[in-house]
Image (tube, rainbow, N blue to C red):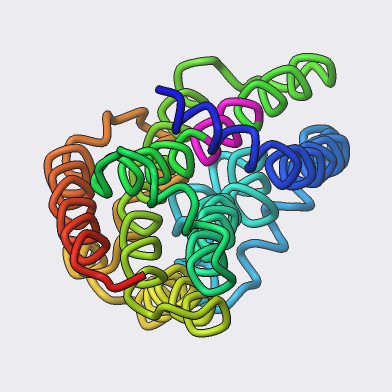
Amino acid sequence: MTLYRYGLRQARLAWLVWTLVVVLIVVMVVSTAAAVVQTPAVYTAVMRGMPASLLALFGGAALLRHPLDSYLVSKLLLYLPLIGGLLGAFQAASLARELETGQADFLLALPVRRAAVFGARLATTLSAVAGLWVVTGLTLLLATRSNHLPLALGPVALLAYAGFVVDAVLVSAALAAAVLAGSYRGGLRLALAIVVAPAIVDWALKIALVPPGWLLVAPYGYYDPARILVSHPFAWAATLVLIPATVVIGYLGQRVFERKEV
């Protein structure tokens, strides 16, 4: 628990900066969404004029009947998991920096198991990402309520949960890769690649009009904000696949860290 609190203190400043930026983005997007609700026909006409591939990226034809949801997906919700993953990637790379600069030597010299050190850092990073999602969800809910926009608590909670589960597996892989790299620059490059590359794959598959089932080959494919807003399904697939994958990847990363020479 001491290691966990120590990690939280280290991540506090970065988390505050990232969260403040995301909160500002959410407030700006929601404030402009009020105009969409007042003139839904205009926005729907704009969406109908999009190419089918671009429309599919933003949720498909089903969102043509829901202008507010379509606007929130295209301007904000589609990109939130990537933002959370980037926060986790930079936090993961910080462990590689501590190993490279020798900052971790004192900690590893203490009578503490390396598995505990790695587990605490993983828990700290996941907590930072979870906190970002919680604050983002609350801000989205409060901002829509203050602008008298019809967005309920249930869909927002499901969005935050699905996004966090996706980020959890990516952050676990990023932390394992950062430890394996051994250097801060190498670890950061690997962590960013692990977070960004699947997003590009997911968007490319959607633009290519690939059937929905094939989207699940990329972690971001388990996060479907358009479907969550329209039909409110629970993220069963993400829960059953990504949570066990997070546990397995975290264990493998822990084994790499235990065997690494520091």
Q: Is residue 63 left or right of residue 42?
A: left
Residue nearer the viewer, 199 or 254: 254
Q: Is residue 201 left or right of residue 183?
A: left
Q: Is residue 54 magenta?
A: no
Q: Is residue 58 left or right of residue 250?
A: right
Q: Give percent across and percent down for residue 155.
A: 47, 25
Q: Residue at x 52, y 26 (%)?
A: 5
Q: Is residue 12 left or right of residue 162?
A: right
Q: Residue at x 39, y 50 (%)?
A: 109
Q: Residue at x 55, y 33 (%)?
A: 6
Q: Give percent across and percent down for residue 108.
A: 38, 51
Residue nearer the viewer, 46 or 160: 160
- Can residue 75 be seen in the rendering of this structure? yes
Q: Give percent across and percent down for residue 38.
A: 84, 33
- The quadrant the N terminus occupies is top left
Q: Is residue 133 magenta?
A: yes
- Can residue 82 be seen in the rendering of this structure? no
Residue nearer the viewer, 206 or 101: 101
Name the image quarter holding residue 50.
bottom right
Q: Is residue 42 above or below residue 195?
A: above
Q: Is residue 167 above or below residue 260?
A: above
Name the image quarter holding residue 213.
bottom left
- The quadrant the C terminus occupies is bottom left
Q: Is residue 53 above or below residue 72?
A: below
